[in-house]
Image (tube, rainbow, N blue to C red):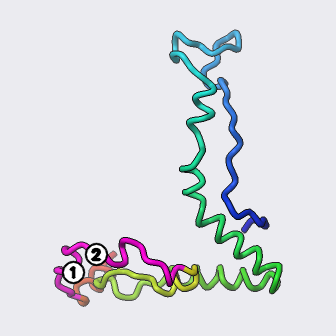
Amino acid sequence: MESSHRIVPASSSKTASVQDTVNSFGLHDTLRYGPRSLSAEVTANGGTRERLENWEATQDNLKLTMQREMFGLHMPMRLLMERKIVAQNSHMPALPQSNIHLDILMGRDETLDCADFMMPASELSQPLDIHAEMEKKLRM
């Protein structure tokens, strides 16, 4: 847990280097590795995709940091321990898995994702043989 009040994920530092394509003179070896544009590499790496991938982690980190400052260190530690315990529990392997407990602890219990209401028909038509699934789980 990083202590920061960042609302939006940090943009990565944009660097470009020819360290892996250097010849004996310290220059980019165009004959061996082809032409190279450092400005294109800098703009290709990072951007919106990177921010979207880190969005949830940044928001979660902000909430935990605010809890730490308001209530003390025990509050985010307790929440992280509860999340870890709840994430480990899988009791009925034959039934469709939905960890509502973890969703509540993460604050996602009031949001709808596609997986919440658009279940494939193949999952609904499978016969529920809990005994066979439990035996399969014990063999592993």
Residue at the image position 52 percent from the left and 79 percent from the top: 108
Above/below status of 82 relative to 112: below
Q: Position of residue 122 (x, y in %)?
A: 19, 73
Quadrant, the N terminus: bottom right
In this figure, which residue is indicated by the disc labeled 2?
119
Q: Amino acid at mark 2?
A: Met
Q: Position of residue 121 (x, y in %)?
A: 19, 75
Quadrant, the C terminus: bottom left
Left or right of 61, for residue 110: left
In this figure, which residue is indicated by the disc labeled 1?
124
Q: Does dot 2 land on a helix, a strand or a loop? A: loop
Distance Cα–Cα, label 2 vs label 1: 8 Å
Q: Does dot 1 land on a helix, a strand or a loop? A: helix
Which numbered mark, 2 or 1, is in the foreground of this view? Answer: 2
The span shown in magenta is 108-129
Above/below status of 60 relative to 16: below
Above/below status of 129 relative to 23: below
Residue at the image position 43 percent from the left and 77 percent from the top: 112
Above/below status of 25 relative to 71: above
Q: Residues within 10 Å of mark 2 (few under 14, many from 20)?
A: few
Q: Are marks 2 and 1 in contact (CB under 8 Å)?
A: yes
